[in-house]
Image (cartoon, rainbow, N blue to C red):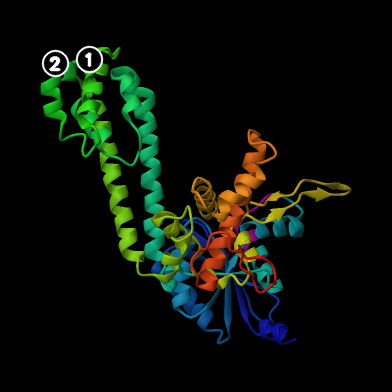
Amino acid sequence: MTATHSMASTVLVAIDISKHRHEVLIGVPGKKRRRRMTVMNTLDDFQRLSAALISYDLPVQIGFEATGNYHRPLAHHLGQAGFDLKLISSVGLARTREALHNSWDKNDPKDAQVILHMLEIGAVQFFHDPLVVGTADIQELSKTHEIVSRSKTELWHRILTHYLPLYFPEAERFHRSSRTDWFLAFLEKYPTPTMITAMSREAFIEDAWQVVGKKVSKERLLSDIYATAVDSVGLPVSPDSDAVRMFRLVLAEGRSLVRQRNEIEARAVELLSDLPDYQLLTTIPGIGPINAMTILAEAGDLRRFRHHRQFLKFCGMDLATVQFGMFRGQSRISKYGNARLRRTLWMAGQTAVLTKTNSFRDKFERYISKDRHNAHLRRKAYTAIAAKMARTVHAVVNHGEPYRPFYEGVSPGGRTSL
């Protein structure tokens, strides 16, 4: 009764977010007619909306659906004005719209009506403004690192599938890791085999000695590269041609992306190294500085999830079953959650199973013991490891204790937390 009475005396505001304008529907206690407003994405309109809500002299609860990043400025402005902000699930909004209107079509005023209905029945989620809770910098580092890494991968694929097959196809075998800069620097200086064979072997080794960096058996490596260049089938393009100039342009871009990625990673370690949660997360096998940063950026304070099942649902790793009538489908992970967080846990799990002496590897080996070469079984095993990684991340931070191999902690619900 208390909650109902409290909601009955609260102004409910539904906002349908878009890029340039926002449709606002206001439900005032005691009035059947809802007030509509159109708020442009300008400071004047933001202040006009705040003034209109303050004029009711009642508690105000505002609900909106996360829409790209377009909701962030308005939500921050309203949050700073002291209003209670609630997030509306995109999936919940779509299902409720279908149930209320019995149709798939949508428009901004209709979405505002559905959002207001969800506010009235309490089907809302918490909204955490990254700028207020202090995770904005971590989020931007994490997202920029992902953008740079993807750009680096795309560029490297272009080099592997276009430039190297044309000019120096045999050089690919000398590349070992995308994290190293020396191979791109080497190709930038010697983009074609003819530029290598124009020198004697001794002159080439002396000229390229500083380019390849600190390598074991550097002289043997350079001798091998020289012998490979002699027998290369690469196209005999001129070193001064536009083709070589374009190849070097792409290589320079790749080296720039490597430098940007290294700079972001160094800054992430500098920013997070003193945080207790970061230190705890990096004790888990498979979680290094970047994975730990992504988890903290996307999940925020893990202690807000009282049980690991809540965290699994937030990640979209909870089980869901499609069923209708007498049909009941196979249970699968829902994937209705944070995709970046889910991908990070998946990658961390894959790394963990390659590390010796930890419970992740032990579980993986037990999972695939029936048929080690069954691809479907291995995929299910990796999914189970990713879910275990999520439970471990939640338990380590909530208990405030570092990861211990083969230790199974107990959650307040009486079930294992790892």
Q: Give the magenta range.
A: 105-113
Left or right of 165, for residue 247: left
Q: Is residue 417 visible?
A: yes
Residue 117 picture location, percent across and down: 69, 68
Q: Residue 41: x percent and y percent?
A: 44, 63
- The main secondary structure of the magenta stretch is helix
Which one is nearer the viewer's eye here, 268 or 253?
268
Figure check: 30 above or below 289: below
Q: Position of residue 373 (x, y in %)?
A: 63, 33
Judged by depth in the image, the label closer to the viewer, 1 or 2, is: 2
The disc label shown at residue 237, or none: 1
**Outermost residue, right side:** 326
> Which corner quadrant holds the N terminus?
bottom right
Would you say 396 lies left or right of 216 here?
A: right
Nearer the observer, 247 or 283:
283
Disc with the residue nearer the chain's start (1 vs 2): 2
Mark 1 residue element: loop
Residue 188 vs 136, above or below: the answer is above
Badge 2: how crowded within 10 Å, few (<14), some, or many (20+)?
Answer: few
- In the rendered image, which quarter is residue 245 located in? top left
Query: Which residue is labeled 2 in the image?
Result: 198
Query: Which amino acid does the dot numbered 1 rest on?
Result: Val
Q: CA distance from mark 1 to mark 2?
A: 13 Å
Residue 274 drawn above or below residue 250: below
| Residue at (71% x, 87% y) in the render | 2
Q: Is residue 367 left or right of residue 164?
A: right
Above or below, 386 relative to 255:
below
Which residue occupies 29% across, 20% down? Answer: 168
